[in-house]
Image (spheres, rainbow, N blue to C red):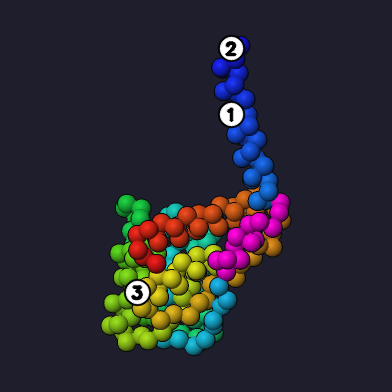
Amino acid sequence: MPVKKLSKYRLFFFLLLSLNIIAISLVFTPVTNYLYAVLEIEPEIRNADSIILLSDGVYTDKIHAGNNYQRMLRAYRLYKQGLADKIIICGGVVIKGMPSFAETIKDFLVEIGINEECLITENRSLNTYEDIKYAKPILRELNIKNSLLVTSSYHMYRSLAICKKLDVSVYAAPVPCYEKNLYNATQRFRFILEVLREYGAIIYFKIRGWI
C-alpha cells in the first residue's frame, strides 16, 4: 500500500478515535450537565394572565415528539392549577399538507379536557423568535400583561432572551429537566445533542439580532 494512502487511513482512524473520545467524555462524565447548567433557568411559577406554550415537533396530526408532550402536559397542569385561564399556543405550518403545530396541539389539549374557548392559536411562526413576535399582538389585543412561558428547560434561556428583546413580560415555567439525572448512554447522548444544538441556536440567534 502506498505511503500516501496509508497516511489517509491513519488520519481517518485518528479522527474517528478523537470523535469517540469526545462522545464518551460527554456521555459518561458531568461535562454535559455543566453545559446544561449555564442554560438552566429557575422556575418562577405564579398567577398570570395567560400561559404561552411554545411548540416542538409534530409528526402527524395525532403523534407528537416527546418534547412536545412534555410541554403540553406542563401547560395543562399549570392551567388545571388555576394559575392562568387561557393558553396561547405558538407554532405555524411546518409540514406541508398538515395543520399548524398550534392547531394540532390545541386538538390534543381539548381531548384531555381543556375548554376550547380557553385556547388561542398563533399559526404563523416557524421558529422561536417568530413564536414570540407573532404572539405579541395577541397579548396586546387580549390586554394580557404577563404570562407563564412553557417550553423545555434547555430552551428557556433563549426563549426568555427573545421575550426580553421584544418586551414581552413572562415568568419562566420550564418543563422540569429529568435528563441530567439519567445514566443510560442512549438517553444521555440524546440530551447531549439537545444541549449542543441549543448552544448553536443561541449563537445563530445572536448573529441574527434576535436576542
Residue type for callout 2: Pro
Question: Which residue is located at x 65 percent, y 61 percent?
Answer: 33
Residue 179: give x, y in percent of width and height.
64, 61
Decide: marks 2, 1 in contact (CB < 8 A)?
no
**Which label lies toward us, 3 or 2?**
2
Q: Main secondary structure of the magenta part?
A: helix
Q: Residue 139's quadrant in the figure?
A: bottom left
22, 43: nearer the viewer:
22
Question: Which residue is located at x 50 percent, y 58 percent?
Answer: 198
Query: For this view, does 72 lie left or right of residue 140?
Result: right
Residue type for callout 1: Phe
Provide the secondary structure element on which disc 1 rests: helix
Q: Which one is earlier in the sequence, the residue at label 3 or at label 1?
A: 1
Provide the secondary structure element on which disc 2 rests: loop
* Residue that badge 2 annotates: 2
- Above or below residue 68? Residue 84 is below
Magenta highlight on residue 38: yes
- Number of the label disc, if any, that sits on residue 84: none
* Residue that badge 3 annotates: 166
Q: What segment carries the magenta color?
A: 28-40
27, 134: nearer the viewer:
27
